[in-house]
Image (cartoon, rainbow, N blue to C red):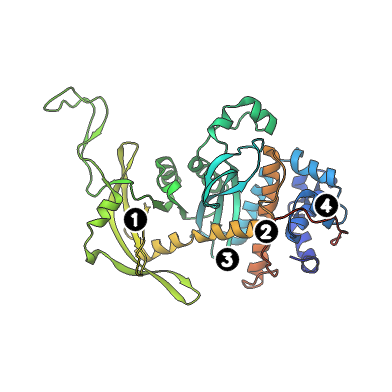
Amino acid sequence: MDAQELRSLRPQLDLFLDRYALLFGRPEAQGHARRFVQGLLLGGERRSVENIAEAVDGCVVRSLQQFISASPRDAAAVLDELRRQVTTEWGDPDAVLTVDETGFPKKGVKSAGVKRQYSGTLGRTENCQVGVFLGYHAAKGHALPDRRLFLPAEWAADAPRRAEAGVPEAVVFRTKPELALAMAADAAAAGLPFRWVAGDGVYGDSPTFCRGVRALGRWYVLDSSADARVWTAEPELVPPGRKPARGRPTTVTRVKTKPARVDEVVAGLPASAWRQVAVAEGSQGPLVCDYAELAVWFIEEGLPGVPERLLVRRSIGQEAELKYHRTNAPASVPLPVLAAVRSKRWSIEQDFQNAKGECGLDEYETRGWAGWHHHTALSVLALWFLARQRDRSGGKNPRAHRPRGARGPRPPARPAVVG
């Protein structure tokens, strides 16, 4: 967004930020927040604190750095208010919560949670931080109402390293599915309406996550790996204390039959099991795939879970690709509805792209725990502003999107262009 575009949106932006101003504390901090959001939206080759201070009138570099990296304000309060506004304006009882993670490449070893780890967004193992995000896909649009920074186990156990990065003592190691489940539970407790939860195999292969979503009373459509194990008939359990024909009595509940791999089960499906389903609307018409489904029991920590439906998606083309999904939705929910829910996972990937490209989500330079949370809270707040503007303009982008070029050296200082 260039300076002229931002100036044209200033009245709406100021009114939007009035709702959040008091959450930042003193008037000086409120001014920092307003100018920082302006700088994130203004764009440029790089939206570091220094560059924002150069581009937005009234900024002082050191004061802005202090505001982002060490402000005592609670960034969670900003996202709490964002969720309330999403609920009021976009609340949809049939909405889909999407969960996914994205990587933030970093050099060195001092940034909170950084390590060499795989990032699906980057498509490789890289020295990076990983954030787990919650998306909200409603009838009016989609937004990112929450996020968590993933803290690897070695970080959680390293007290000196934690202290240097400012990681709070109350923060313990939690897996990505556990972080995602905590955000979904917080969203439900805050009254954000949704019926569905969607995510990739990281979450579909997690018994903790699946059980947690079921405990929230929601339905999920989650990806499953090909080597996940299932039973295709209700398995018979052997209770503890039962003495088999040979050997000692059992001490734990066991299952009489062994589960099979998902891909092996699907390989045995007859041709009649498949039917074509329109999964989404594309630019050139409906996107159609072959789908099959069957009743299964997924293995969850050695024992069968609740009855579920295994969905198999097969692309139509010369090289058919199979994707596996699991859902706890009842049989009364038709397959096309489930396929459409799963297809809405794309929205969180688009939000990542927009948040990084339009709102500087990945352009922070702070290393500390507080700095990451402050920067990302303001970035997703800026993204929510753009999403509202897009909805109010009938789906049109409120700004002319210009893809960023490759990052190079910092541009030279320039006069402030936004007052």
Q: Distance from label 2 to label 1 (Cα)?
A: 48 Å
Under mark 2, the amino acid is: Ala
Q: Quadrant of residue 89?
A: bottom right
* Pointers 1 and 4 in contact (C-beta within 8 Å): no
Q: Distance from label 3 to label 2 (Cα)?
A: 33 Å
- Residue 21 lies, in percent from the top left, at 77, 50
Which tag, 2 or 4, sits closer to the chain's start?
4
Residue at image mark 4: 53
- Residue 7 lies, in percent from the top left, at 81, 66
Under mark 4, the amino acid is: Ala
Name the side, left or right, on which 174 lies relative to 108: left
* Pointers 3 and 4 in contact (C-beta within 8 Å): no
Which tag, 1 or 4, sits closer to the chain's start?
4
Under mark 3, the amino acid is: Lys
Camera-side mark, 3 or 4: 4
Give the answer, above or below, for where 310 lies relative to 172: below
Residue at image mark 1: 330
Quadrant into which the N terminus falls: bottom right
- Residue 256 lies, in percent from the top left, at 20, 37
Which tag, 2 or 1, sits closer to the chain's start?
1
Q: As drawn, which residue projects farthest toward the bottom? A: 284
Q: Distance from label 2 to label 4 (Cα)?
A: 22 Å
Under mark 1, the amino acid is: Pro
Residue at image mark 2: 406
Q: Which mark is residue 140?
A: 3
| Disc 2 element | loop
